[in-house]
Image (cartoon, helix red, strand yellow):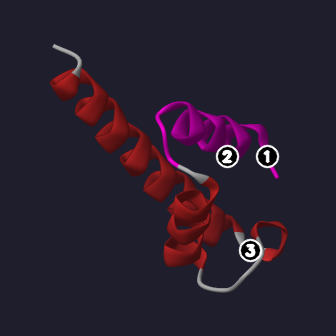
Amino acid sequence: MDHQIQELLRNLVMLGYNSVQVRNIIQAALGDRDIADVSHAERHQLVNTLEEYVRLGQEFVLSYSK
């Protein structure tokens, strides 16, 4: 698994997503395929999806930390 994906997964956990939620996000992006077996295009889609969830999580934290 590449560094960018690992970093995004760590960010999700730090934002409060649990392992089941993270797994569901990955499954929504890739279906039942393993991260190690996906094409470059699918990996790019996964990165985009993870980035979107990180952004949403950050917005949530900012909204409720005021």
C-alpha distance separating marks 1 and 2: 6 Å
> Is disc 2 placed on a helix, strand or loop?
helix
Q: What percent of the width, then of the height, locates residue 65?
A: 23, 18
- Residue at left 58%, top 39%? 13
Amino acid at the residue labelled 1 = Asp
Looking at the picture, does residue 65 appear above or below residue 1? Answer: above
Amino acid at the residue labelled 3 = Val
Residue 5: give its label.
Answer: 2
Q: Is residue 56 magenta?
A: no
Q: Main secondary structure of the magenta part?
A: helix
- For the magenta stretch, what is the residue range? 1-17
- Residue at left 19%, top 26%? 64
Q: Which residue is mark 1?
A: 2
Q: CB of mark 1 within 8 Å of CB of mark 2?
A: yes
Task: Name the one closer to the observer, 37 or 63.
Answer: 63
Q: Which residue is mark 3?
A: 38
Q: What percent of the width, then of the height, locates residue 3?
A: 76, 38
Q: Residues within 10 Å of mark 3 (few under 14, many from 20)?
A: few
* 52 displayed left or right of 9: left
Task: Name the one closer to the observer, 53 or 46.
Answer: 53
> Is disc 3 placed on a helix, strand or loop?
loop
